[in-house]
Image (cartoon, rainbow, N blue to C red):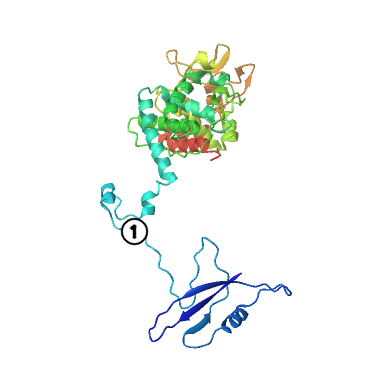
């Protein structure tokens, strides 16, 4: 504990004030174990000096000196010290660098993290646009890739030994090759989500009469520890099932309506025997992400067909290569599967499912589907952020 005294000295007839801070260590009574009050210090100290016009002792408030890093409160009668301004005269060097009018602290402060992150995203977004526009076939591949990397959490990795990922090996290799020069900007997991977001935007805007599409992006995903040795076993939706919607709801926390909207991603791409064991496309606009998937589903007669031992639904017209998987037709029709055979062999003989009304709404209203699809996509990729 420390105390201080103001000693005000007068010399001759000339008024000259000298303020001294005398720090005295507080004595501790060895008998009573207490701090001696400041009044005792003052009495003991002032008794050794004559009280005349040359000396005048004024005790100040007894309090500890402030700790380091904290500005002390001024003693009574002493004005507070004015803080030194950080603004300095503008030098010629500062004029050339455009730093005039800025404080030194402001000039030295780097851009905030969010600003740098936004700049990184925009830089990478521009490169992605070039990448996709050079090959629009990447659009369906990127959508399938982001979906598969988000099963179990969007960690940017796939198990290439998993049969469901058989058709993604080339796409995944191309994406990683694209990402490596930009690795300092975003993680691989974030990059895959951003690439899929841009693929959605480009594909939707390819539809005639389409307005500008906005797919917001949020970073913060962590890539798996070793993408080259990723053997995590996950459960993927499969086309021969009749309720993929329930799995999407459980996996991504979607509403049933959002899950139906997310399945509209089948509007782009096609099935290939060598990859999935199924064959055909869902609608006639393979590279445009639109509501034609629902229009095709509602406006076509479908017949039960076996392809390489797997069941799918083909358009009844012989020259029509469109098809639907069990999981697709189950959105519109209510049927069961037994021994690889449906309970109704033709879509006309199947009764409507409980989701049929929502499917028909999306078939009529492309704008509503687009809005719901983007929201469902964001719910999927932002889970856990």
Q: Nearer the viewer, residue 220 or 54?
A: 54
Q: Is residue 290 visible?
A: no
Percent position (x, y) of residue 312? 54, 18
Q: Which residue is more in the foreground, 82 or 100? A: 82
Q: Residue furthest bottom?
A: 52
> Which picture quadrant has residue 288?
top left
SS at badge 1: loop
- Vertical relation: 50 (above or below) 145: below
Q: Is residue 210 visible?
A: yes
**In the image, residue 365 lies at what x, y percent?**
42, 35
Q: Determine the image quadrant of residue 336.
A: top right
Residue pictured at 41% horizontal, 29% vertical: 199
Vertical order, 344 against 80 (above or below): above
- Within 10 Å of disc 1 (Cα), the crowding (few <14, some 14-19, many 20+) is few
Q: Out of 69 and 225, give the one closest to the viewer.
A: 69
Closer to us: 369 or 335: 369
How many marks can you see?
1
Rendering coords of residue 23 (x, y %)? 55, 71
Per the image, the residue denoted by label 1 is: 87
The residue under the point 49% across, 16% down is 272
Q: Position of residue 68 (x, y in %)?
A: 53, 61
- At x 47%, y 32%, the residue is 193
Q: Is residue 341 above or below residue 123?
A: above
């Amino acid at each position: 504990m420390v105390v201080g005294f103001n000693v005000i000295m007068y010399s001759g007839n000339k008024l000259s004030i000298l303020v001294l801070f005398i720090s005295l260590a507080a004595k501790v009574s060895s008998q009573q174990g207490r701090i001696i009050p400041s009044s005792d210090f003052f009495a003991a100290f002032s008794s050794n000096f004559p009280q005349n016009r040359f000396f005048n002792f004024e005790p100040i408030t007894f309090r500890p000196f402030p700790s380091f890093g904290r500005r002390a409160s001024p003693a009574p009668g002493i004005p507070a010290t004015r803080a030194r301004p950080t603004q300095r005269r503008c030098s010629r060097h500062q004029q050339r660098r455009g730093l005039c009018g800025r404080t030194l602290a402001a000039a030295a402060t780097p851009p905030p993290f969010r600003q740098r992150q936004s700049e990184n995203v925009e830089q990478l977004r521009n490169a992605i646009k070039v990448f996709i526009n050079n090959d629009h076939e990447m659009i369906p591949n990127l959508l399938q890739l982001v979906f598969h990397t988000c099963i179990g959490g969007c960690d940017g990795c796939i198990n290439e030994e998993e049969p469901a990922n058989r058709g993604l090996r080339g796409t995944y290799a191309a994406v990683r090759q694209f990402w490596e020069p930009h690795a300092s900007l975003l993680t691989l997991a974030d990059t895959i989500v951003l690439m899929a977001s841009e693929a959605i935007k480009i594909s939707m805007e390819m539809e005639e009469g389409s307005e500008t599409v906005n797919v917001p992006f949020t970073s913060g995903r962590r890539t798996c520890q070793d993408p080259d040795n990723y053997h995590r076993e996950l459960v993927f939706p499969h086309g021969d099932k009749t309720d993929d919607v329930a799995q999407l709801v459980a996996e991504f926390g979607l509403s049933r309506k959002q899950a139906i909207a997310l399945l509209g991603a089948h509007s782009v791409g096609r099935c290939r025997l060598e990859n999935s064991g199924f064959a055909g496309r869902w609608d006639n606009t393979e590279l445009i992400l639109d509501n034609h998937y629902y229009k095709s589903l509602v406006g076509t007669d479908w017949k039960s067909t076996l392809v390489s031992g797997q069941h799918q639904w083909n358009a009844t017209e012989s020259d029509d290569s469109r098809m639907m998987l069990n999981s697709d037709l189950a959105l519109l029709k209510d049927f069961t599967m037994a021994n690889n055979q449906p309970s109704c062999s033709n879509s006309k003989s199947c009764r409507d499912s409980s989701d049929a009304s929502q499917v028909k709404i999306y078939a009529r209203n492309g704008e509503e589907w687009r809005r719901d699809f983007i929201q469902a996509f964001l719910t999927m990729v932002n889970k856990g952020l």
